[in-house]
Image (spheres, rainbow, N blue to C red):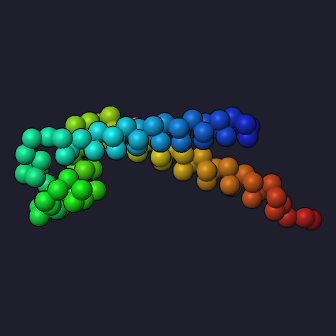
Amino acid sequence: MNKPFLFFQLILSLGIFSYTFFTFGWAASYLMLEDKWSEMLIFSKDAMTPRDISDLDKLIFGFQHAPLVITILIMVSLLYALFLIVLILKRILLTNYQPTN
């Protein structure tokens, strides 16, 4: 594969990751709008106001509403982006540090 194609794939996968992560965070922020939101809390049981809700409780709430789509898209796009970064770095390092005979 040539470098421009790898960079295009990297930008695309990071774009998919950031979009799904943003929409997941947006869905998770609706926890405090639910009726009886204080009963849904796991890690911050003593939260008196919606500002006191921990981020872990928001993440759990977000996974309850879109578990399959969020998990697959976030994890696959992040792992693919990391794979592409390693592949690009490997190519750069191998071309720059060729042994001379």
Q: How far across and how far down the image is residue 15, in percent? A: 53, 38
Q: Residue at x 19, y 46 (%)?
A: 32
Task: Give left or right: position of 65 versus 42.
Answer: right
Q: Between 21 and 10, which is closer to the camera in this rendering?
A: 21
Q: Residue at x 33, y 40 (%)?
A: 26
Can residue 64 be seen?
no
Q: Is residue 76 above or below residue 97?
A: above
Task: Give left or right: position of 61 versus 95.
Answer: left
The C terminus - image quarter: bottom right
Task: Give left or right: position of 55 versus 5.
Answer: left
Q: How far across and how far down the image is residue 45, in percent? A: 11, 61
Residue 64 falls in which quadrant of the image? Answer: top left
Task: Give left or right: position of 99 versus 45.
Answer: right
Q: Between 18 and 68, which is closer to the camera in this rendering?
A: 18
Q: How far across and how far down the image is residue 70, in percent? A: 33, 39
Can residue 78 be seen?
yes
Q: How far across and how far down the image is residue 4, in percent? A: 73, 37
Q: Between 73 and 65, which is closer to the camera in this rendering?
A: 65
The N terminus - image quarter: top right
Q: Residue at x 48, y 47 (%)?
A: 79
Q: How many marks?
A: 0
Q: Residue at x 20, y 53 (%)?
A: 50
Residue 44 falls in which quadrant of the image? Answer: bottom left
Outermost residue, right side: 101
